[in-house]
Amino acid sequence: MMNREYQYTFKISGIVVCLHLQHEILVEDRFKLFMSDEKPDYNIYFQKVETLDNTDGEVFYEGISYAAFANDNSEFKRKFWDRKRNKYLYSTGTYDWKNRVIIVKYLQGEEEMFGCVNACFFYIAWEEILMHERRIMLHSSFVETAYGSILFSGVSGAGKSTQADLWCKYRNSRMLNGDRTILQWSNEELIGYGSPYAGSSKCYIDDSSKISAIVFPEKKNFCKVRKLDRGTAFRRIFSGLTVNSWNVEFVEFACSMTEKIVKLIPCYELSCTPDKNAVEVLEKVLREEVVYE
């Protein structure tokens, strides 16, 4: 008797991926918003097996929960382990970027590790899919304003979400994402996409908008805006990107993407207080300097 296949298809930033599984999984609310019935660009097959294939090969990255390596055929692969079980190896992934097919094999009895969509996305190398489709994620809050869309970016605790919320409160702006904005260049415009990854903001909007400015807030007891030079802007943007530093192609793409952003998109440092004054000070600069439609 053939096992039943369960399919879950999602369209995120214009990329359609279909998860093929042998068991049902939980679809979290944040992923339900991105479900699609379109033909997939990428097919990801999760296969239950009794034993895993040979995992020998040159390891070029080892993290907490997985390692990236190449086998004798120079295939890009990952192997996954559970550090709570003394690095118990329970899954492997093979990534065929040319044919857009990903195969994730896992040992029988490990279905719990693949119990929801968010868990499954950990195994599919989502950030690599974005890179191959010329997109990248930036740690930022994404707000659509009367002056075009703004990305509030920076390290955790810098005030990104606070400043985005203030624009929504005092200028009736619309937040499209609260944590991980997907970026893509299209016809010389920087386009931001909402995504299922939004941190504590829980703002998951399936929409896109042209980016007019990138702002790096810093908590102060006063409000002031300073336009960043390209070098400073490059360093700040690059540090907020999701990049696999062990993948040369990925790093080169991230550098090229960032270089174009700092050349064409104005970037600012916003010294700010958590109140309406911060909105007014930034708004004055955006009104005078930023080109928007």
Image: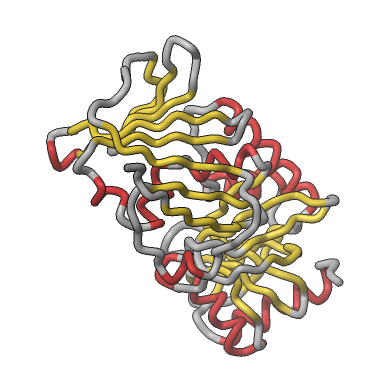
Looking at this view, name the residue that lies furthest to the top.
Answer: 72
Measuring from the top left, give residue 26's x and y in whole percent: 35, 63
Left or right, 264 with respect to 244, comes to right
Residue 29 versus residue 260 in the image, above or below: below
Quadrant holding the N terminus: top left
Left or right, 206 with respect to 119, comes to right
| Relative depth, front residue between 40 and 146 | 40
Measuring from the top left, give residue 115's x and y in whole percent: 30, 55
**Which quadrant of the figure has residue 290?**
bottom right
Measuring from the top left, give residue 260's x and y in whole percent: 75, 44
**Which quadrant of the figure has residue 238?**
top right
Q: Could you tell me which residue is drawn at 63 percent across and 37 percent down?
A: 132
| Relative depth, front residue between 251 and 132 | 132
Quadrant holding the C terminus: bottom right
Left or right, 244 with respect to 99, comes to left
Q: Could you tell me which residue is drawn at 40 percent across and 64 percent down?
A: 27
Residue 276 versus residue 103 in the image, above or below: below
